Amino acid sequence: MKKIFITLAFVSTLFSCEIIWDNGPTQLLKDIFEVTKTIGVEKLESAVKQSNFRWIRPKGFELWDVYSLFDDAQRAKLTEIVENSSLAKAKLPTRKHYDAVVIFGAATPRVQDRIAFLMKLQQQGITWNKVYLLGSTRDLKIGNEADKAMAKVLEAKGAVATEMAMVNEIWQQTPKPDSFKDIPTVSIQSGQRPDGVRASAEDTLREMTKDFGDVQGKSFLFISNNPYIPYQDAVAKKVLGQYGMSIETVGEAMTAATTLENVLDTVARCLTNMKSS
């Protein structure tokens, strides 16, 4: 039993933000810093400052917006580093049953992938008692091409083309076993912030707590995909840790469509989250 516990603890750490910073920069982060010629980052505060300055998406940009931060040589080296790291690998659940599963909202293709991943887990015998679908009021008509196509589908049905409506639509159209009819599904939508900026994952998670009863000791399985698993796991634990629930975040491996810019943006956000935790 002790051996199994150690193994599970290792797996959990492997896919959290500690793969980036663990009482100092990990080898993965050191390699990234070396390729990007980032110096003076042995302290977390400096690492956060440097990574935010260099890697955080420009203001107003979304994950699907294309921009370039690296030359060809850097891109080749970084690709090799990332593809050989946990940031590129799938993560599977460590339990057979959860009190609830939570699907993070995203652009249409990633939501489709996340729901498909959950259905694979069901086929492998993973079970749960409740489903939370997370989304925002983000307008799909100004999203990527898949979002825009989904917006047309939703509007043809008389629905407002928001991220939340898209998540609900994909969930409803996904084939499910008859046993799912008895599992409650709750949609959690967050609106814009007072400054007009669209809601973040933290905002939606806080909105989700309004549906909580007593979740002390209950197990929640969050569905994401890499390279976003470590950061979204950290955010979930930061926002919900006070409720005494067990939190585990899993998902598919990184796809070829994921840009290095998005990978390092996520690395920077992990570092920032560790500084503020």
Image (spheres, rainbow, N blue to C red):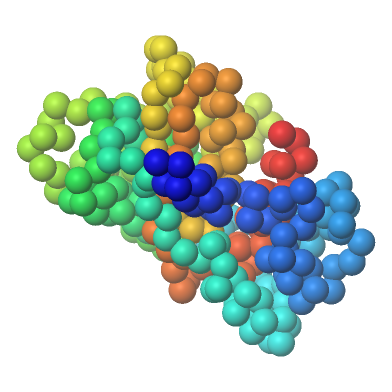
Residue 131 visible, this orientation: no
Query: Looking at the image, is 36 positioned above or below residue 116?
Result: below
Q: Which residue occupies the extreme left position in the image?
A: 178
Residue 44 in the figure: left or right of residue 211: right
Return the residue nearer the eye: 194 or 206. 206
Query: Looking at the image, is 35 positioned above or below residue 276?
Result: below
**Quadrant in which the C terminus is drawn:** top right
Residue at figure coordinates x 37%, y 45% from the top left: 94
Give residue 76's position: percent from left, percent from top.
Answer: 64, 84
Q: Which residue occupies the extreme top position in the image?
A: 213
Return the residue nearer the eye: 201 or 194. 201
Residue 243 visible, this orientation: yes
Return the residue nearer the eye: 243 or 54. 243
Residue at figure coordinates x 76%, y 67% from the top left: 30
Q: Which residue occupies the extreme bottom position in the image?
A: 73
Residue 30 in the figure: left or right of residue 200: right
**Quadrant in which the N terminus is drawn:** top left
Residue at figure coordinates x 67%, y 82% from the top left: 77
What is the quadrant of residue 215 in the picture?
A: top left
Residue 260 in the figure: left or right of residue 37: left
What is the quadrant of residue 225 in the picture?
A: bottom left
Give residue 159's position: percent from left, percent from top.
Answer: 30, 38
Residue at figure coordinates x 61%, y 32% from the top left: 238
Return the residue nearer the eye: 135 or 120. 120
